[in-house]
Image (spheres, rainbow, N blue to C red):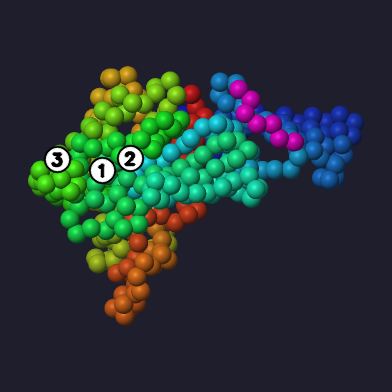
Amino acid sequence: MPPVIPPSHHLFLHHHLHHHHHQSVTSSLVSGFLITNLIHCTKSSNAASCQISWLVRSLEGKTLVTRIGDGNLTTVIFQALLERLRNKRLVFVGDSLIRGQWVSMVCLVDSILPKTLKSMHSTANASLNIFKAKEYKASIEHYWSPLLVESNSDDPVNHKVVERTVRVKAIEKHAKYWTDADFLVFNTYLWWRRPVMNVLWGSFGDPDGVYKGVEMLRVYEMALRTWSDWLEVHVNRNKTRLFFVSMSPTHERAEEWGAGKGNNCYNETDMIAEEGYWGKGSDPKMMRVVENVLDDLKERGLNVQMLNITQLSEYRKEGHPSIYRKQWNSLTQEQIANPKSYADCIHWCLPGVPDVWNELLYAYIFYQ
């Protein structure tokens, strides 16, 4: 595990006083890279006479960013991240939870870029959203495929269907948009939460296609095997680094953390204090399937780094949008009278929990 150490963890701190000059040098290990902050003052009592400079180096010693003048640690970190992404594609692939992680990452770097040096556009029938940092020739992207393989829920807008069907052996329609990326971050979990999945062997619209209901966990494994086989054959292992984000917890049943039955995350304002708390919405069997598939890939020479965000997110029952969500349809009088009935206890507020997921991600991106 790469180091994710708070900025207050100083490796060393030097103060030099010489005549009317005062110099302070602080080095910190932060999210997988070494940041040195030098403050040099000509008159120690006058802040206006001080010059601030920053140096960011990777753990292998490569200088990523030097910055002279005012600034703060956050700005320097994200400037270093963009430097690491120079001439590269970072693509998040999956459902709306990983889309939230993509939005988090875009917001983190957006704040340090002038308006003329960034852009946002979509392609592939709006399945692929691309944020570009023009000066760095870097892109941070999200590709919508909630089950990773092909399904009848692949439309990025109209994906609510009565009976969800998955083409468990087909992924090329999606994979052609992301296979050549430099950093790939995958997830798939939320859309599998049902006991039986409808599986199609063949193409949608093919009269010879075979449909059959299959136990979900088995279908989940089949889909991940299709995904892993594609990665093994098509990904350039000298170029592309791979990540898989573990399942994102939900907080839809308040009795699980000792609150009133029938309630959910609505009106929750505190974290869960119980150490090791694990909600029933997070399925260890599905996590084991993912781990087995990743272990098999590793034996075949392809490393996919798991970003295990489940336990750290379990505590955050107060981190969901709750009733402060986008409403796609007008609320009924019954819903207005009972706000918890339309509270979103699945997705996450931003700023919020996905920012922490990204701290783990960019620690890995920096740590090689």
Classify 10 Å Cα crowding around label 3: few (below 14), some (14-19), many (20 and above). some
Q: Which residues are magenta?
A: 62-68
The residue under label 1 is 150
298 to 32, vertically: above or below: above
The kind of residue tagged 2 is: His
Residue under the point 51% across and 45% down:
131
Give the quadrant of the N terminus.
top left
Q: Position of residue 199 (x, y in %)?
A: 15, 44
Q: Position of residue 152 (x, y in %)?
A: 24, 50
Question: What is the secondary structure assignment of the residue under circle 1?
Answer: strand
From the image, give the main secondary structure of the stretch colored magenta: strand
What is the tally of numbered marks visible in this picture?
A: 3
Q: Position of residue 213 (x, y in %)?
A: 10, 47
Image quadrant in which you'd find residue 55: top right
Question: What is the secondary structure assignment of the residue under circle 2?
Answer: helix
Cβ–Cβ under 8 Å for marks 3 and 1? no
Residue under the point 64% across and 50% down:
115
Mark earlier in primary sequence (3, 1)? 1
The kind of residue tagged 3 is: Trp
In magenta stretch: residue 65: yes
Residue under the point 28% across and 19% down:
300
Cβ–Cβ under 8 Å for marks 1 and 2? yes
Residue positioned most to the right: 19
Cβ–Cβ under 8 Å for marks 2 and 3? no
The residue under label 2 is 174
Mark earlier in primary sequence (2, 3)? 2
Mark 3 and mark 1: span between their CA atoms? 11 Å
Which sits in the foreground, 18 or 329? 329
Question: What is the secondary structure assignment of the residue under circle 3?
Answer: strand
The residue under label 3 is 201
Mark 1 and mark 2: span between their CA atoms? 7 Å
The kind of residue tagged 1 is: Glu
